[in-house]
Amino acid sequence: MANERLILAIGHMERALTRLETAQARLGEQAGRPSSDADLADRHARLKEAAAEALAGIDTLLAEKR
């Protein structure tokens, strides 16, 4: 049971990391182009959400280790 939850948590973290890497790659592609404020705000919100999910996964893992 604990191993199953650990595997699920790792899966969540891997998916969040993939989203972060994808966002970073998009930023690299768009580095030469000016972005609108709305576009920047949207990308920031998506990146913030992905980071929060990754941190929640880490918190879950740490809580299970106690």
Image (cartoon, helix red, strand yellow):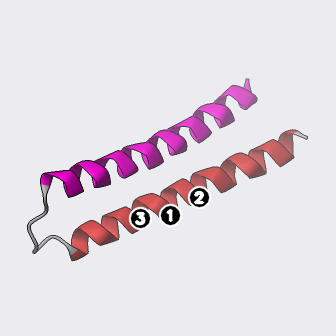
The quadrant holding residue 31 is bottom left
Nearest the camera: 17 or 42? 42
Task: Look at the numbered discs 1 and 2 and tell me whether their residues touch, using CB distance below 8 Å.
Answer: yes
Q: Position of residue 49 (x, y in %)?
A: 44, 44
Decide: few, some or many residues near mark 3? Use Cα within 10 Å; few <14, some 14-19, many ≥20: few
Query: Which amino acid is tagged 2?
Result: Glu
Q: Residue furthest right?
A: 1
Judged from the image, the secondary structure of the residue bearing numbered disc 2 is helix
Q: Which element carries disc 3, helix, strand or loop?
A: helix
Spatial CA distance of label 2 from label 3 is 10 Å
> Was residue 41 drawn as part of the magenta stretch in this picture?
yes
Residue shown at the point (25%, 66%) measured from the top left? 27
* Residue at image coords 85%, 39%: 2
User: To which residue does mark 2 refer?
Assistant: 14
Residues shaded magenta: 37-66
Left or right: 3 with respect to 60? Answer: right
Residue 63 at what x, y percent from top left?
68, 26
> Which residue matches tag 1?
18
Residue 13 is left or right of residue 27, and the answer is right
The 10 Å Cα crowd at callout 1, few under 14, some 14 to 19, many 20 or more, is: few
Residue 66 point in image, percent of width and height? 73, 23
The residue lying at 32 percent from left, 64 percent from top is 24
Dot 3 amino acid type:
Glu
**Marks 2 and 3 close (CB-CB < 8 Å):** no
Q: Residue type at mark 1: give it.
A: Thr
Label 1 to label 2, Cα distance in Å? 6 Å
Q: Horizontal placement of 15 versus 11: left or right?
A: left
The residue that label 3 is drawn on is 21
Query: Where is the N terminus found, in terms of image quarters?
Result: top right
